[in-house]
Each structure stands twice: as C-alpha cells, then as structure tokens.
Image (cartoon, rainbow, N blue to C red):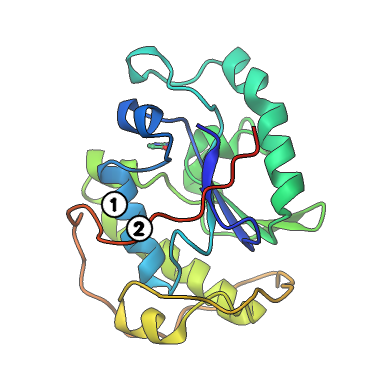
Amino acid sequence: MPGQGSPNADIMFIGEGPGFNEDKQGVPFVGAAGQFLSTLLASIGLSRETVYITNMVKCRPPSNRDPLPEETAACAHYLDAQIAAIAPKIIVPLGRHALGRWFPNEPIGRLRARPRVFDGITLFPLYHPAAALHNGDLRSTIEDDFLKLGALLEDLGDVQQQPQAWAAFAPAPERAPAAVVEAPENPTTPTAPAQPSPGVPSEPDEPPAQQLNLF
Ligand code: URA
C-alpha cells in the first residue's frame, strides 16, 4: 500500500503502517484513526485530496504489531522515493515510528508540534491520531497540535489551505496550486475560534483522492 493523495502536495503525513483494512483496500488511514485524521485535516482547511498520506512500512505487520526495525529499513527506499517524487514542503511524522526516521531516540511527546527544518523540508511531528483512540485525554492535545500546524501553514502563506473551511471546520473542496513555503522558527498560536470536539465521525462521504501509485 504505497499511499494516497496529491502528487503536488505541499504536506506529507507519514503514519506507521497499514492496518488490516488499509492493506486490503490499498488506501492509508481508512479506519477510525483515519476518520479522525480526516476530521483533523478539515479543521485546518485541508483534505485528503490536497495532502499526501503514506506510512513508514508499506505492508501490514502480522497481528498489527509494531513494525520491526528491519521492516522499516526494508521499506525506507520506497519512502525516500515518495519524498523525492512529491517534494513536500512540510512532512508531518505521525507518531514515534515515523518520528524515528529523523529522530530515532527522541520521544514524540517532546518534539511534537515544533517545526524543524531538514534539507529544506520542514518537519512538524504530531501524535499519531490513533493515540486519541487509546487515550481520550490526548484528543484535545492532538486537536490543538493540528491547529498549530494550521497556524504554521497560515504563517507560511500556504494556499492549499481553505480559509473558510479552517474557520467553519468543514471539509474543504478544490484547492488552488500550492505556494512555496518557508518555515519560521516558531509558529504562532492559531487565531481561529475554538472548535467543538468533533468526535470520530462515520465514514466520510467524499470522492476518493487521486491515487499516486509510485510502486
Ligand atoms: N495507522 C497508520 O499508521 N497507518 C495507516 O494507514 C492506518 C493506521
């Protein structure tokens, strides 16, 4: 399961690995964590069609266990090729496994929601959305962290974002082409009004995003 989204995406989200349904459907983040991810994207005016979503490992580890280091290593060149092909301005590692590609020994809790520039790409690590499913207390933290990502995009003048959706917390339709973005040292706090916790919605009724099959 390579990934899904726009080949012109400015932002790439990298999860851990496909689960049972993702592996079957060939689409990342289709389960409850994926539905929460879609809601989080909408909260900052993004959609699956305008970002690119992929995983560290491209096949489901047996019994949904964590990927082994050798599995992550075996898939690394696929991810390298995806990053090179899409050339995102911002990479969002979701959770500790994806963070480990750049910071192998750093806890996600310490590095989350802080931009760092690597080879011209801004990394903005966030908790994995599934963390909120296991620990409800993390939900509002993850929502707040996404608002910080939205504020970073606003600061960078990224036009893939829909201001109306950002304000209204609604799914975003078509987007204009992306602008090149530069990362500031410190993102500002978002100015959008506080939004009610959306909960994990049922299957979103949206057209399938353009599939970019790199492999
Ligand atoms: N969790 C992930 O990390 N990736 C998926 O694609 C689905 C759930």
Give the residue at x 39% y 74%.
Answer: 172
Answer yes or no: is residue 124 visible.
no
> Is 212 placed above or below 174 here?
above
Give the residue at x 45% y 85%.
Answer: 163
The amino acid sitting under disc 2 is: Ser
| Relative image position of residue 100 (x, y in whole percent) | 60, 33
Q: In which image quadrant can residue 66 be found?
A: top left
Q: Which mark is residue 38?
A: 2
| Relative image position of residue 166 (x, y in whole percent) | 40, 79
Tags 1 and 2 touching, CB below 8 Å: yes
Q: For the residues marked 1 and 2, what is the alpha-carbon distance in whole angstroms?
A: 5 Å
> Is 43 placed above or below 40 here?
below
In terms of secondary structure, where does tag 2 sit? helix
User: Does mark 2 have its CB less than 8 Å from ligand 1?
Assistant: no
> Is 83 placed above or below 69 here?
below
Q: Which mark is residue 35?
A: 1
Question: In the picture, which quadrant includes the C terminus?
Answer: top right
Give the residue at x 65% y 73%.
Answer: 178
The amino acid sitting under disc 1 is: Gln
Q: Nearer the viewer, residue 57 or 174?
A: 174
